[in-house]
Image (spheres, rainbow, N blue to C red):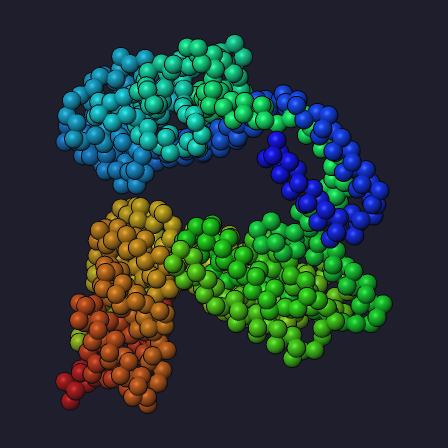
């Protein structure tokens, strides 16, 4: 009895504090409080010897709810995993090169050597493309024609397995391309000793040849999808009630000790979880199950109820029916408090961002509407700021969404620290924020606030011992100069923000009417640019690269020009940023790469000197997961030898996720192409990483050459870059050379190649071909001295 009295004393002390602190609660009145206390004492004395009879069901319901949530989460994880592997089978079905090699391998007209080569190419392609997924243990392509041998990535297992008599093989052939999921085998489908399940489907070539694709996947991927079930276990079962993964007492492939209790009432994917309590070997078991949408398998949680009832029995014996009396009395107080608390909570959730705790778009719109009415009545002015974090997507993609969330939370906190309580800060969506500065129109005061905001946001944010940096672009609109309604003010602030981004980011802009015009023009250009390739409006120009020691052309850099049917030639400085922003740079870049390679091959076939052609890769091209395959395919299709293609990336690209950049560069280098770092010296390269990059050339940016003749420091920097590059066995090309004085200084510094207007502007294809045909030797300082 003493512990119960102590708990009741604490409970009433808590409610007394609420009465004392909350004026709304005090309104209930002292009489109600006295009546509640007296009634509670009477009920406690009268019913203290009756136990609470429903404790067991409460515990079961609570555990069932938690188990259902865990099972649903595991099901959703498995659905995502299964769809990913279904996508892999689809990518194989749509891989034209692989289908071609399968045709070559299965053709009756193909000799044994060609079959061997085709088989190796298929295995190599599978290994390169899909074994980055560590969960895939083997991939098999099994010909339906028994005369042909299986194609498999299992090169270490020499035993030939005859799959044609397997039931799943026959089902796959009959299914005619539908996906099939195969149960876990304890030693794998190719008997390699590792438990694995599999996905299969029929590949049917246009020639009529058929192969059964079988991808073996480690059963560990299933185990990793399980959530934590306290005092129980999670399993995955096929319709035959066989285990996909091992449990405490059974192995993969065994029939589960818990019978299939849902066979009479089948589970359907997407429906609420099914649960049931059954007795197995004298013990009651709580079973919760969910159907996986991608297959016929079931995710099942099993919990012995004996473990659940230990605490429930104790509670049932110790809890007395007097709690009913306490509930009735406290309800009179709680009713009003809870309603008020819920109303506040619901409103808060409806009007605030769940991540940052800032106002959301809905609340901001209400606040600004009230501010417009107040400003119109008092003839005041106010300002709206539209903020967007620069480079946020890179941080989100590189370090994960948790790092991105951390950055957003910290940004929200810093904005609240900078601004006073009269201002309203809202998260507009993603990495965009809106700020209302009431009764603010003074230009200098607004600039002061903007400066404080940019200074605070540029401070580093630390996440898992990593230092993350972002900047912010800000657009400003003012009432009533720029607009007198919500839509105009937010729209114009947004327009000004994008203008700030286009001006180099980490910037701010006040709205003006010219921005609307510029935005419309850019949208029109983007629309026309989407059709530029198909309408043959894009042209390639080439600028020769001259070897200083000989004066001969050793390479050409590819430059893109757009001949608009109405506007004429549009400079790259106008349409390339639009292509980058709209991601059109990916198909355009692929067209440039293909056209440049094709043209260089055509020059070589025409007997012109063999030179390399340099092509710039954008960050979106370089970060594409298929960039290596794209370059390899273009080289194969055009017939250009890899050493005559040079790919240029900027320093800023090279320093994004350096480990991944090194892997991509190594893959390109393995193809045999040359790689150069463009605009060297303008970014923030780390020499520690630079030495690990498989590159052959550095290109010195034009900005270092503009003052090289009159500025000794510029000459020293250029000379140091060249010495460093040569010490790393790299060649150096100077861009933007315009005078013979620059040529002389670069030659004195042992620069290898130059390109610039001193020798040639970027020229069309036919003029470049004429230069190559002339085998022109350009005058350099050294050649001028030799000629007297």
Placement of 497 over or under 94, stated as above or below: below
Determine the residue positioned at 51% across, 53% down. Answer: 405
Q: Is residue 316 left or right of residue 246?
A: right
Q: Quadrant of residue 441?
A: bottom right
Q: Is residue 182 left or right of residue 432?
A: left
Tell me the quadrant of the picture where the C terminus can be found: bottom left
Q: Is residue 124 left or right of residue 388?
A: left
Residue 106 in percent (x, y) is at 24, 25
- Front residue of 143/436: it is 436
- Front residue of 361/542: it is 361
- Front residue of 34/566: it is 34
Placement of 39 over or under 585, stated as above or below: above
Determine the residue positioned at 52% across, 60% down. Answer: 410
For the image shown, how many numbered marks are present on the structure?
0
Q: Quadrant of residue 87?
A: top left
Q: Is residue 290 visible?
A: no
Residue 505 in percent (x, y) is at 51, 67
Determine the residue positioned at 43% across, 27% down. Answer: 231
Residue 668 in percent (x, y) is at 26, 53
Residue 32 in percent (x, y) is at 82, 40
Determine the residue positioned at 57% across, 69% down. Answer: 453
Q: Is residue 46 visible?
A: yes
Tell me the quadrant of the picture where the N terminus can be found: top right
Q: Of all residues shown, which one is farthest toward the front?
A: 2
Q: Quadrant of residue 118?
A: top left
């Amino acid at each position: 009895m003493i512990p119960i009295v102590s708990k009741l004393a604490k409970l009433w002390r808590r409610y007394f504090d609420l009465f004392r602190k909350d004026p709304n609660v005090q309104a209930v009145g002292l009489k109600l409080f006295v009546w509640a206390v007296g009634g509670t004492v009477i009920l406690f004395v009268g019913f203290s010897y009756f136990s609470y009879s429903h404790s067991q069901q409460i515990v079961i319901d609570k555990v069932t709810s938690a188990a259902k949530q865990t099972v649903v989460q595991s099901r959703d994880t498995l659905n995502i995993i299964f769809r990913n592997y279904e996508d892999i089978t689809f990518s194989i079905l749509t891989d034209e090169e692989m289908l071609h090699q399968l045709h070559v391998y299965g053709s009756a007209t193909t000799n044994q050597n060609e079959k061997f080569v085709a088989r190796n190419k298929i295995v190599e392609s599978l290994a390169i493309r899909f074994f980055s997924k560590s969960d895939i243990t083997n991939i098999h392509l099994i010909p339906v024609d028994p005369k042909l041998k299986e194609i498999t990535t299992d090169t270490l297992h020499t035993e030939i397995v005859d799959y044609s008599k397997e039931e799943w093989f026959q089902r796959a052939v009959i299914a005619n391309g539908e996906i099939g999921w195969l149960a876990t085998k304890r030693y794998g489908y190719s008997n390699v000793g590792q438990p694995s399940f599999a996905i299969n489907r029929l590949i049917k070539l246009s020639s009529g040849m058929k192969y059964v694709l079988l991808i073996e996947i480690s059963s560990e991927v299933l185990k990793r999808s399980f959530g934590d079930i306290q005092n129980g276990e999670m399993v995955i079962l096929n319709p035959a009630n066989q285990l996909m993964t091992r449990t405490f007492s059974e192995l993969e492939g065994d029939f589960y000790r818990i019978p299939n209790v849902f066979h009479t009432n089948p589970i359907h994917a997407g429906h609420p979880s099914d649960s049931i309590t059954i007795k197995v070997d004298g013990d009651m078991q709580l079973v919760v199950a969910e159907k996986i949408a991608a297959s016929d398998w079931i995710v099942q949680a099993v919990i012995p109820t004996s473990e659940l009832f230990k605490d429930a029995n104790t509670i049932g014996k110790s809890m007395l029916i007097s709690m009913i009396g306490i509930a009735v009395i406290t309800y009179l107080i709680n009713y009003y408090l809870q309603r008020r608390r819920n109303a506040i909570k619901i409103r808060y959730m409806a009007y605030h961002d769940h991540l940052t705790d800032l106002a959301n778009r809905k609340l901001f719109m209400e606040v600004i509407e009230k501010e417009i009415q107040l400003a119109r009545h008092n003839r005041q002015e106010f300002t709206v700021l539209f903020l967007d974090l620069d480079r946020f997507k890179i941080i989100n993609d590189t370090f994960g969404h948790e790092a991105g969330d951390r950055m957003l939370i910290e940004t929200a906190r810093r904005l609240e620290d900078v601004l006073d309580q009269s201002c309203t800060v809202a998260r507009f969506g993603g990495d965009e924020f809106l700020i209302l500065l009431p009764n603010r129109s003074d230009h200098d005061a607004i600039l002061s606030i903007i400066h404080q905001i940019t200074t605070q946001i540029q401070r580093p944010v630390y996440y898992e011992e990593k230092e993350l940096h972002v900047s912010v672009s800000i657009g400003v609109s003012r009432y009533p100069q720029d607009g007198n309604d919500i839509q105009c003010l937010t729209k114009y602030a947004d327009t000004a923000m994008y203008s700030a981004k286009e001006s180099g980011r980490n910037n701010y802009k006040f709205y003006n009417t010219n921005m609307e015009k510029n935005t419309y023009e850019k949208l029109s250009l983007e629309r026309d640019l989407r059709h530029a390739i198909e309408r043959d409006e894009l042209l390639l120009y080439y600028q020769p690269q001259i070897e200083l020691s000989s004066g001969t052309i050793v390479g050409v850099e590819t430059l893109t020009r757009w001949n608009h049917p109405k506007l004429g030639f549009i400079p790259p400085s106008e349409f390339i940023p639009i292509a980058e922003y709209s991601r059109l740079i990916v198909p355009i870049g692929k067209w440039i790469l293909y056209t440049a390679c094709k043209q260089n091959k055509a020059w070589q076939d025409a007997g012109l000197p063999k030179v390399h052609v340099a092509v710039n890769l954008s960050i979106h091209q370089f970060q594409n997961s298929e960039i290596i395959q794209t370059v390899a395919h273009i080289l194969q299709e055009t017939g250009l030898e890899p050493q005559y293609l040079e790919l240029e990336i900027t320093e800023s690209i090279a320093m994004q996720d350096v480990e991944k950049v090194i892997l991509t560069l190594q893959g390109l280098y393995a193809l045999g192409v040359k790689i150069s770092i463009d605009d060297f010296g303008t970014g923030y390269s780390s020499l520690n990483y630079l030495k690990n990059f498989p590159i052959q050339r550095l290109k010195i940016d034009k900005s270092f050459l503009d003052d090289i003749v009159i500025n000794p420091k510029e000459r020293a920097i250029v000379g140091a870059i060249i010495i460093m590059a040569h010490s790393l066995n790299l060649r150096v090309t100077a861009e933007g050379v315009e005078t013979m004085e620059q040529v002389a200084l670069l030659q004195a510094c042992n620069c290898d190649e130059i390109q610039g207007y001193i020798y040639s502007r970027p020229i069309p294809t036919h003029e470049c071909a004429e230069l190559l045909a002339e085998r022109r030797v350009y005058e350099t300082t050294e050649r001028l001295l030799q000629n007297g």
